[in-house]
Structure formats: structure tokens, C-alpha cells
């Protein structure tokens, strides 16, 4: 059993009273040298001592440290442990404790604290630029941690969101064709029902987001659909992940659940395409998406059982007679949260479209909705009013849900962010790369009234064509899609050429869409692409290889300028370019021109894309005058 020194025992006694305080305050603690001396035997002194090296200013270990507290009601109370600093330097808090007041928890305020290093990154010689600003260690009094108490957190988040969050109420027309009725076939059984037969037009239902994995899952087929509807499915026959999802749904008082392998007829192409097209409405209308985040297959489960990852535990009685218990756990970081589900391609649209997500991980439970992100232990509390403590969803590897519809420029940067994320995800089947995005395409189309074009959009085609390969050495081309769409590249996509533009009003484009056409074997985006055509018109210029065989130079024009030429091939060519490269202007700024590199194919006037480039100036040349001099050229891109 770890021990606390006398000073830290008094420290805990002080902070246990702070949440009852009505105003800010200060108290003396002990010296830094005493903390270092006690670090060998005292658990808290060890934490405090370890954090000294992250101070941005030089510290005097012989001065008495101070405890400062800032009371905020409603909201969390902040407790800071400070080294007094010179008058001309603001004091440095090397440890912060935050009461978990802003989390929807039934645990009494004075019984829950978070303790963290506040690692200040300054400019001193001892500063470590690779260290995160904050790493959180929760401290709380013990409570029975079982399925019942864990569901109090879940129920509190769910009911609070349902009652108060306006942004989480958005629904659209459309329902899945089938749902699982968790009350339909008697005790111990669930049944598959057609939504057209339900008495309510808008039934409340949950969805399950999960990894299929390599094990054969229980599925609905043309042979089993009647049995699943009439006889039902025994819960005991369900994979553990499915059974846990049923338990969550029932515990939150909801009757219906949607699971893809059971609610879609898996051996019917027509049914699969119909439901794949409807993914936008399926997840948007779901009251909650249960995310089996840490499970790699259907047998992994949702980690509902109680687990305790305490590293240290202390139980004592303070000088005031209050009994307390402290537990320290591993800090929450992206690395210690297992998230195989979030690497899957299909899951991007499930995450973005869902109004509410319950991330069930092997570490703990996380709640995410359009307005809030909470962790079960209280170390993360982020809400729509700007209040925030702890790490962000992005910092933990969770996709931050972004609201769209606030202007075209923001919409496009959001879409580009989704593409960058999506292109780095895993697919079991290569053919799913576009279908797994169909729901998100439909959602974005409804929100912007734009026309989709194989992962790009007509209204901002000059920007959407400006993608590049993040790592051309690791990329390869697919013949399934035309060369102009990022879907033709197997590799991570980079849109920094457009999204890093500070002033979008600078963008000017000569690009004109002459003709665009896409044909499918069945439903758009979820069936096979049978034919596509894209004819564009824009200004063109030529790049010629230099003698070194590695770099390129702009062919001289009357208003030529060149500070730098940056040409990124989609896939690294086997040999250095020997002939001139045609450059097709997408848009220009005050100091740069962004262009496609294209090469002719067998037919006259037909080209394929081979890369993206930037022609930049140091301010002496004029991209606008240079582009104005160039001739327009109409081409068909293959």
C-alpha cells in the first residue's frame, strides 16, 4: 500500500473542502526540496517531483509552494499548485487539479478530482518540445464499479442530451427497411421486423457500429430472413458484441436496434445496394450509435464488465476526521485506448452521421454527441458552450464531429478533412471504397445542394481536383476509377494545397466544366462504375526537365516568373521525365498557381492526370498576369 507524507495528507484535507467554498483562495503547502526528498515514499510527491522538470522558468526548490483555487459555479473548480515567481513573470502552475463538476455524474463533487501535470512548454534549455501539454491522472474516492454504476453515467449522458441538446435533434426522412425488435419474440429472443409494419412512423432505435473481423458472423440471408422474422433469434446465439449491444439498448429503455449483418439481406445485391444508399438516414435518425470501439470482431464484446486499472491506492483519515481514498490510474492517451474499429473505412460515415455515439472501449466509456464529449472517469469534459477540460476527441484519436452547412468554404474544408481521414482507413474489400462513403456523400449533397462527382463536387471542382498523394512512394493507382479523382489512388490523400490558404477570397480560377457524366450498373455510388466522362477547359503552360533530370523549369513566357516549382507526382515514375509536361491551371492566388500535371493518352485531346504542382513567386512576379497570357485549352480527363 502506497503512503502519503504529512504535507500531502494535509493537502488532500484542504482540497476536499474547496468545492464547498464560495470564493477563490490561497494556502501554503511545502517546499520543492521537501517534495523531492519525500518522492521516494510518497505517491503524490513523486508526481509533483516528476513535473518540476517541465517548468518553463527557473525554480527555487527552497521556497514554499502555494495552493490556489478558483471557484466556478456552475462548472469545475480549478486547484493549482504554484511556485511563486518574480513580479515580472506570471507564476507557473506545475500541477492542476480539476473537480469533475461539469461531467454528468452522480458522484458527489467533493469526492472526485482529476490530477494532472501541467507541462508548460517554454523556450528554456530544458524544454522538451515532444511532451504533450497535459496528461491527466484521475483521483477519486472509491465506489462500487459495476455494470449498474457504469450505466448511471451512460443514462445521465443520454437523458441529458435528449432533453437539452438542440443540435442533436436533427432528423431526416427515411428509415432502414428492417429493425431488430428486442421485445418481439418473448424472453430471451429478438425478432427482425419490417419498419413499414410498425405502428409509429418514427420509431426510436439504436445502431451498432462494429468490426466484422475474420470470424463468421450471424447474418440474415434469403434463406434465414423468414425464420428471423417469425421465430426470432435467441440472444444466446448472438455474438458477444451483438448481445452487449442488445443489453445497452434495453438498459436505456429502447425497443429497436439496427445491426447491419442482421438487418440487411447479405446475399441480395439489390437489398444491399438499397440499404447502403440509405446509410445517411439510418445513422442520422438513430437515437444512439453503440460503438464497439475496442473490439476487432463480433466476439470481442463491448467491455461492459467492471474493470479497475488502478496503479496506486491509498485509504486514510484526514486530520479533520474525513475518511478518504485516492486512486491513480494510467493517464488517458491515444496510445492506451485500443480502437481497431476507428481504423475501418465504413466507420467514418457512421461516426460523422451519428447524432450520439457511445464509445465502449477496454479503457473506459466515452460519450460523444454533437455538443459534448465526456469520459467515464471525468478526465475529459468538453461541451458546446466552450467549457473544456482534459484532452480533446481528436487528441485521443476520436474523430471530432463537425457541423456543416455554415458556408461553402467551410463545407469544402470539412469535406477535404473527411477525405484525408477516409483515405488512410482499412478496407477488407477494395470494391467498398466508394460505397462506404455513399451515406456521407448523400448527407453532404442534401446539406449543400451540390452535385457529387466521384468523391469531388461540381461547384468547387477547381479546389477538389487539388489533391495530392501524402506519400507517393507508398501509393499506387487503381484502374477502377478515372485518374482525376482521389479514389484512383491507393494511399493517403493530402489537401493542404487548398486548405492551408489563409484568405479564400484570393482564389481565382479559369477552370470551366464543359461536360460531366457518370454511369453506374445500379444505384449511384454503391454499384459498379460503368462509364465516366469529364471535359474541362482552362489555361495551360509547359514544364521542361532540367539537365539534372530531377527538377522542372517553366517554359519561358512573356510574363513568366519562377521563385519555385513544386511538382508532386501521384505515384513516383519509374524514370525521370524526359519530355515536357503539360500543366493545367486549377486556380491561382496572389503569390502562386496551383495546377494539374497531365499527359496525353492515345486519343487526341484526351489526357490523364499524373500529379499536382505549385508555381510560386517571391512577390516580384504576378501569377494573375502570367495566367492571363496563357491560352485556354479544352481537354477530356480520363
Image: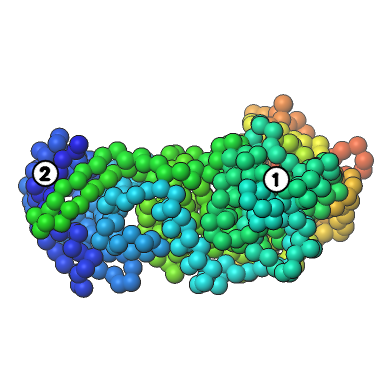
Camera-near label (1 vs 2) is 1
Q: Is residue 146 above or below residue 462?
A: above
Specify the quadrant of the image occupied by residue 449. Answer: bottom right
Residue 225 in the image, given as x and y percentages of width and height: 80, 46
Q: Is residue 389 left or right of residue 561?
A: left
Residue 488 shows which numbered tag? none
In the image, residue 446 lies at what x, y percent?
73, 66
Instruction: Return the residue found at the far front.
Output: 186
Residue matched to label 1: 233
The quarter holding residue 410 reads bottom right
Q: Please report the residue visible at 22 percent of the width from the left and 40 percent of the height from the top.
A: 50
Q: Disc 1 on helix, strand or loop?
A: strand
- Mark yes or no: residue 378 visible: yes
**How dense is the environment of label 2, judged by Cα within 10 Å: few (below 14), some, or many (20 and up)?**
some
Residue ID at (19%, 41%): 43
Height in image: 399 above or below 219? Answer: below
> Which quarter of the rendering shows the C terminus?
top right
Residue, x 63% and y 69% (percent of image)? 170
Q: Is residue 263 visible?
A: no
Circle 2 residue: 5
Side of 41 relative to 343 (left or right): left
Q: 604 or 408: nearer the eye? A: 408
Q: Residue furthest right?
A: 603
Estimate the x, y position of residue 156 in percent, counting from the top left: 45, 63
User: Considering only vertical position in the picture, is 198 above or below 8?
Assistant: below
Within-10-Å neighbours for mark 1: few <14, some 14–19, many 20+: many
Q: Closer to the camera, 617 or 196?
A: 196
Marks 1 and 2, the one that precedes in the sequence: 2
Distance between the alpha carbons at the discs numbered 1 and 2: 59 Å
Q: Are marks 1 and 2 in contact (CB under 8 Å)?
A: no
Amino acid at each position: 500500500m502506497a503512503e502519503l507524507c504529512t504535507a500531502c495528507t494535509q493537502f488532500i484535507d484542504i482540497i476536499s473542502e474547496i468545492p464547498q467554498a464560495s470564493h477563490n483562495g490561497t494556502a501554503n503547502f511545502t517546499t520543492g526540496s521537501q517534495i523531492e526528498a519525500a518522492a521516494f515514499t510518497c505517491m503524490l510527491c513523486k508526481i509533483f517531483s516528476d513535473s518540476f522538470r517541465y517548468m518553463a522558468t527557473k525554480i527555487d526548490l527552497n521556497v514554499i509552494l502555494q495552493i490556489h483555487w478558483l471557484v466556478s459555479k456552475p462548472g469545475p473548480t480549478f486547484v493549482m499548485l504554484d511556485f511563486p515567481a518574480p513580479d515580472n513573470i506570471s507564476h507557473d502552475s506545475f500541477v492542476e487539479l480539476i473537480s469533475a463538476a461539469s461531467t454528468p455524474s452522480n458522484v458527489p463533487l467533493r469526492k472526485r478530482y482529476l490530477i494532472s501535470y501541467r507541462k508548460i512548454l517554454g523556450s528554456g534549455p530544458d524544454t522538451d518540445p515532444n511532451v504533450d501539454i497535459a496528461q491527466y491522472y484521475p483521483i477519486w474516492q472509491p465506489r462500487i464499479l459495476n455494470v449498474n454504476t457504469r450505466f448511471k453515467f451512460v443514462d445521465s449522458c443520454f437523458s441529458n442530451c435528449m432533453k437539452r441538446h438542440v443540435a442533436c435533434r436533427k432528423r431526416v426522412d427515411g428509415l432502414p427497411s428492417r429493425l431488430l425488435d428486442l421485445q418481439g419474440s418473448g424472453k430471451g429472443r429478438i425478432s427482425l421486423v419490417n419498419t413499414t409494419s410498425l405502428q409509429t412512423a418514427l420509431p426510436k432505435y439504436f445502431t451498432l457500429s462494429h468490426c466484422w473481423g475474420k470470424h463468421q458472423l450471424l447474418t440474415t440471408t434469403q434463406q434465414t430472413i423468414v425464420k428471423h422474422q417469425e421465430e426470432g433469434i435467441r440472444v444466446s446465439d448472438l455474438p458477444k458484441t451483438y448481445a452487449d449491444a442488445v443489453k445497452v439498448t434495453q438498459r436505456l429503455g429502447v425497443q429497436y436496434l439496427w445491426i447491419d449483418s442482421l438487418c440487411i439481406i447479405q446475399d441480395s445485391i439489390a437489398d444491399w445496394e438499397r440499404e447502403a444508399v440509405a446509410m445517411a438516414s439510418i445513422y442520422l435518425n438513430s437515437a444512439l450509435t453503440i460503438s464497439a470501439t475496442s473490439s476487432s470482431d463480433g466476439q470481442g464484446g463491448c467491455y461492459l464488465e467492471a474493470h479497475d486499472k488502478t496503479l496506486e491506492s491509498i485509504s486514510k483519515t484526514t486530520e479533520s476526521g474525513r475518511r478518504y481514498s485516492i486512486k491513480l490510474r494510467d493517464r488517458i492517451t491515444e496510445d492506451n485506448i485500443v480502437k481497431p474499429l476507428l481504423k475501418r473505412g465504413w466507420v467514418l460515415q457512421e461516426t460523422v452521421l451519428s447524432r450520439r455515439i457511445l464509445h465502449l472501449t477496454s479503457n473506459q466509456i466515452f460519450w460523444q454527441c454533437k455538443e459534448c464529449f465526456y469520459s467515464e472517469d471525468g478526465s475529459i469534459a468538453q461541451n458546446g458552450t466552450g467549457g473544456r477540460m482534459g484532452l480533446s476527441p481528436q487528441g485521443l484519436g476520436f474523430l471530432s464531429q463537425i457541423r456543416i452547412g455554415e458556408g461553402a468554404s467551410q463545407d469544402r474544408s470539412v469535406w477535404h478533412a473527411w477525405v484525408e481521414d477516409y483515405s488512410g482507413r482499412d478496407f477488407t474489400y477494395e470494391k467498398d471504397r466508394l460505397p462506404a462513403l455513399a451515406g456521407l456523400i448523400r448527407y453532404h449533397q442534401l446539406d449543400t445542394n451540390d452535385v457529387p462527382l466521384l468523391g469531388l463536387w461540381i461547384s468547387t471542382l477547381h479546389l477538389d481536383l487539388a489533391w495530392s498523394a501524402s506519400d507517393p512512394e507508398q501509393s499506387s493507382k487503381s484502374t477502377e476509377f478515372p485518374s482525376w479523382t482521389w479514389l484512383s489512388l491507393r494511399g493517403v490523400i493530402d489537401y493542404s494545397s487548398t486548405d492551408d490558404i489563409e484568405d479564400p477570397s484570393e482564389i481565382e480560377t479559369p477552370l470551366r466544366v464543359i461536360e460531366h457524366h457518370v454511369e453506374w450498373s445500379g444505384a449511384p455510388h454503391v454499384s459498379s462504375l460503368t462509364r465516366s466522362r469529364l471535359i474541362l477547359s482552362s489555361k495551360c503552360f509547359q514544364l521542361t526537365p532540367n539537365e539534372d533530370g530531377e527538377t522542372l523549369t517553366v517554359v519561358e513566357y512573356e510574363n513568366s516568373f519562377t521563385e519555385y516549382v513544386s511538382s508532386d507526382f501521384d505515384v513516383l515514375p519509374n524514370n525521370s521525365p524526359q519530355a515536357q509536361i503539360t500543366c493545367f491551371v486549377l486556380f491561382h492566388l496572389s503569390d502562386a498557381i496551383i495546377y494539374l500535371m497531365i499527359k496525353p493518352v492515345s486519343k487526341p485531346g484526351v489526357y490523364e492526370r499524373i500529379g499536382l504542382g505549385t508555381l510560386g513567386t517571391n512577390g516580384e512576379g504576378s501569377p494573375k498576369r502570367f495566367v492571363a497570357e496563357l491560352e485556354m485549352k479544352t481537354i477530356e480527363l480520363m
